[in-house]
Image (cartoon, rainbow, N blue to C red):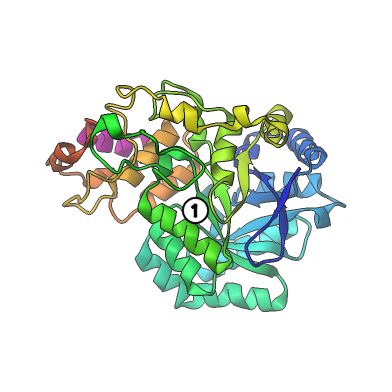
């Protein structure tokens, strides 16, 4: 296993990390098996955003006696209320849930105290200028948190955080489907000579974000590196061609400032598939050739999250709604986190007025109004 420094934190983290979300589905022994396989592979960082009590306890038991070998990202603002996950900015509820996380992990500190899930700029400013940030800063002073981080899917928010001087690292969504935006609406030019080891072919705002993070010493750990598994199938990939776990991992790890990718593993076999990156050949890692040879017709009708559809008169972030819908549609059961992310948007699919103006601007012929209706139906369903 190779290790990288996480920005200016001084922490050396394994290139492959463990995203704990899918461990909610498993019992104590199964969680223990995954944790032990991670340790065997040299993985030393895990993310626990989950508020569900049982999975927190199971992870705590699995690392018992070996807490110091793990770097843990624990989230502040992720709570368990009335039997379900709720993201909150209520300080009392957030503090209670964070203490519960410490107790169940059998520790008195989190290496990385993550301000949980901030996806809108207005909320970012409210948090940073208010009692929420002041509270986590106080916890750092008390030693309950070693470093302050933030999780976000929005590059504009991530940029604000990276430039704030107050956020030391980011948990950010990175994968080719989220990153790669066509510089042209000519489909024949979409992939030509752009997908290499540089920043070519990437949405300029995301490319700028990675550079700012690198310049400011703000390390990135990656979530959604597999796009919820969407990239593993030619049928569901927006590129019309499948990538492997190793190729997705390589893509994330070749972005500036990225230190580790939190792979969502729920079995020892999946841990081994991710850890195989460390011994993979350059040919096995090569995502660029795969994407460059993607058939031009394959992604017609499929959202690539490029943003050409904007602006929406209802203020809907169409690309974000489509991302959440596509991630949710890959799962047998919609994760609570995706529902919460969707509901937290200031405007979502339910606000679509079906004016179809966005569809006229979409270079890929996506039936956007239909997708907004489908997203509302899937993600608002109780």
Task: Residue at the far right: name it.
Answer: 65
- Judged by its main secondary structure, the magenta piece is helix
**Front residue of this view, candidates 231 and 123:** 231
Span shown in magenta: 369-379
Quick one: quadrant of the C terminus? top left
Compared to residue 52, the image places residue 127 above or below, namely below
Compared to residue 316, the image places residue 250 above or below, namely above
Residue 373 within the segment the image draws in magenta: yes
Left or right: 98, with 67 as reference point:
left
**Front residue of this view, candidates 8 and 285:** 285
Residue 142 in the image: x percent, y percent? 71, 77
Residue 4 in the image: x percent, y percent? 69, 54
Circle 1 residue: 86
Q: Quadrant of residue 136?
A: bottom right
Residue 381 visible in this rendered orientation of the protein: no
Q: Provide the secondary structure element on which disc 1 rests.
A: strand
Residue at 62% over, 78% down: 138
Residue at 48% over, 27% down: 290
């Amino acid at each position: 296993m190779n290790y990288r420094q996480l920005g200016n934190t001084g922490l050396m983290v394994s290139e492959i990390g463990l995203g704990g979300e899918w461990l909610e589905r498993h019992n104590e022994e199964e969680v223990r098996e995954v944790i032990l396989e991670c340790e065997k592979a040299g993985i030393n960082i895990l993310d626990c955003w989950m508020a569900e009590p049982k999975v927190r306890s199971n992870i705590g038991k699995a690392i018992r006696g070996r807490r110091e070998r793990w770097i843990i990202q624990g989230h502040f603002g992720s709570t368990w209320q009335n039997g379900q996950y709720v993201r909150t900015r209520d300080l009392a509820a957030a503090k209670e849930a964070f203490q519960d996380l410490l107790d169940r992990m059998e520790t008195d500190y989190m290496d990385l105290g993550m301000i949980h899930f901030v996806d809108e700029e207005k909320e970012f400013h409210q948090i940073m200028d208010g009692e929420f940030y002041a509270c986590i800063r106080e916890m750092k002073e008390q030693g309950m948190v070693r470093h302050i981080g933030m999780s976000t899917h929005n590059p504009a928010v991530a940029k604000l955080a990276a430039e704030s001087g107050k956020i030391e690292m980011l948990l950010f969504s990175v994968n080719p489907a989220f990153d790669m935006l066509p510089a042209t609406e000519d489909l024949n030019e979409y992939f030509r000579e752009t997908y290499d080891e540089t920043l070519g072919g990437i949405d300029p705002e995301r490319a700028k974000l990675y550079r700012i993070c690198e310049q400011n010493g703000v390390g990135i750990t990656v979530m959604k590196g597999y796009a919820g598994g969407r990239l593993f199938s030619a049928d569901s990939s927006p590129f019309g061609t499948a990538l492997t776990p190793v190729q997705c991992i390589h893509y994330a790890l070749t972005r500036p400032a990225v230190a580790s990718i939190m792979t969502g593993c729920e079995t020892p076999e999946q841990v081994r598939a991710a850890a195989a990156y460390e011994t993979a050949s350059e040919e096995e890692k090569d995502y660029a050739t795969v994407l460059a040879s993607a058939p031009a017709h394959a992604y017609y009708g499929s959202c690539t999250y490029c943003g050409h559809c904007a602006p929406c008169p209802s203020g809907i972030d169409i690309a974000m709604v489509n991302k959440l819908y596509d991630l949710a549609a890959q799962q047998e059961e919609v994760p609570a986190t995706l529902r919460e992310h969707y509901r937290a948007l200031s405007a979502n699919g339910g606000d679509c007025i079906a004016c179809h103006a966005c569809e006229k601007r979409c270079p890929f012929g996506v039936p956007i109004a239909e997708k907004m209706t489908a997203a509302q139906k899937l993600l608002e369903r109780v």
